[in-house]
Image (tube, helix red, strand yellow):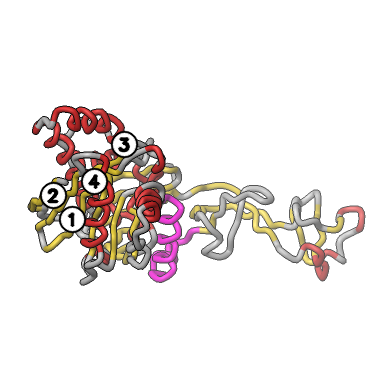
Amino acid sequence: MIVNKKSMSIENLCIPPEFQQNIPTLFFDIETTGLYWKRSHLYLIGAACLEGDTLHLTQYLAQKPAEEEEILQEFYTLAAGFQRIVHYNGEGFDLPYLKHKAAFYEMEIRLDNLESVDLFRCIRPLKKLMNFSQMKQKDVENFMGYQREDPFSGGELIEVYQEYLRTADERLLKCLLLHNAEDIEGMVRILPILNYLRVMEGSVKLQSAELTDSGEHGCLALEFSYESPALPREIRVQEPPYRLLLTPSSGRLETDLEQGMRKLFYPNYKDYFYLPLEDRAVHKSVGIYVDKEYREKAKASNCYQNVEGLFLPQPEQLISPVLIPEYQSRAYCTPFSPDLLDKADLLESYLREVLKFLS
């Protein structure tokens, strides 16, 4: 067995608040000769802890398949000193694999009592926002600007390891250790992407609201700050009628206003008559005076009043009154007036709803 230790400097990270807490945290990644634990071997485990700006890495490499149990035992002994483990898609592969191997060797399974953070599952809600075609760790690393030296994929590394077992070539050993080390360093490098998740979940503070002349009928522009650490890079999202700009230090949401006719539906349609010639519903207390020839019992689909004007789209039925273009449409909107600009609490709630919609 080879035990390799190294430390590396990782500076200027915008670490999410949940990783700033004083919880002993271990990042880890495993390398195997296949996906199914019964027909493959565990040959390399890397584990690291972050202290300030320094990442301390320990790697355990089996120089022959018979050392699999030994490296597993060494890793479990190391992990016993931590309260939280961090991995990338470990819930889908690494943890079940280790659990099966531990059971095979009749070891105590020592990871079950630790808080487990799967970065893959944490980041997955950002797939749409970041326009990721896939959710491989390297895709997230590329977005964050982290460039690897290692040219191999995990699958390609199996042949490298098998060749190393035959030749004991030091150059191949360096390739094996480098790939695993960069897997773990990459996890740390991509941590700041979780700050986007906090923003899109509504961890924001409205700073200002204004009506601008952007768009055909103007737009509502909301400037906001973050209640979490700074974002690592600027991104832009456009999903009409919304435009979102997230800079490292602040954000801006623009919603295009819409001009035209919308319908205000009444929920208690049994209390209304529908007037076909006027294309509107009136309460029975009023409609009773309309000739029977010009009225009919209202239905849910025609119990409405037409409203013409300027409207603010909204992703959910947040700001009342809520109007829609047609029956059962989800294109919600509300009449817009300049008075809305003075309702900071309502606009902040609106901002949070749109952010959730865009994420």
Residue 313 visible in the displayed image: yes
Mark 3 touching mark 2, by CB under 8 A?
Answer: no
Mark 4 touching mark 2, by CB under 8 A?
Answer: no
Q: CA distance from mark 3 to mark 1?
A: 22 Å
Give me the residue at 50% from left, 53% from top. Answer: 313
- How many marks overall? 4
Out of 249 and 74, give the one closest to the viewer: 74
- What residue is disc 4 on? 67
Q: CA distance from mark 2 to mark 1?
A: 13 Å
| Image: 326 above or below 316 | above
Q: Amino acid at mark 2?
A: Val
Percent x, y for residue 119?
32, 53
Characterize the local packing of mark 4: few (<14), some (14-19) or many (20 or more) Cα atoms within 10 angstroms.
some
Give me the residue at 11% from left, 30% from top. Answer: 169
Would you identify the image quadrant in which residue 239 lies? Answer: top left
Characterize the local packing of mark 1: few (<14), some (14-19) or many (20 or more) Cα atoms within 10 angstroms.
many
Out of 99 and 354, give the one closest to the viewer: 99
Residue 332 lies in magenta, yes or no? no
Q: CA distance from mark 4 to mark 3?
A: 14 Å
Percent x, y for residue 226?
27, 62
Per the rendering, the mark at residue 33 is 3
- What residue is disc 1 on? 48
Is label 2 in a helix, a strand or a loop?
Answer: strand
Magenta segment: 336-359
Mark 3 touching mark 1, by CB under 8 A?
Answer: no
Say which label, 2 or 1, has the lower sequence index: 2
Say which label, 3 or 2, has the lower sequence index: 2
**Main SS type for the magenta part?**
helix
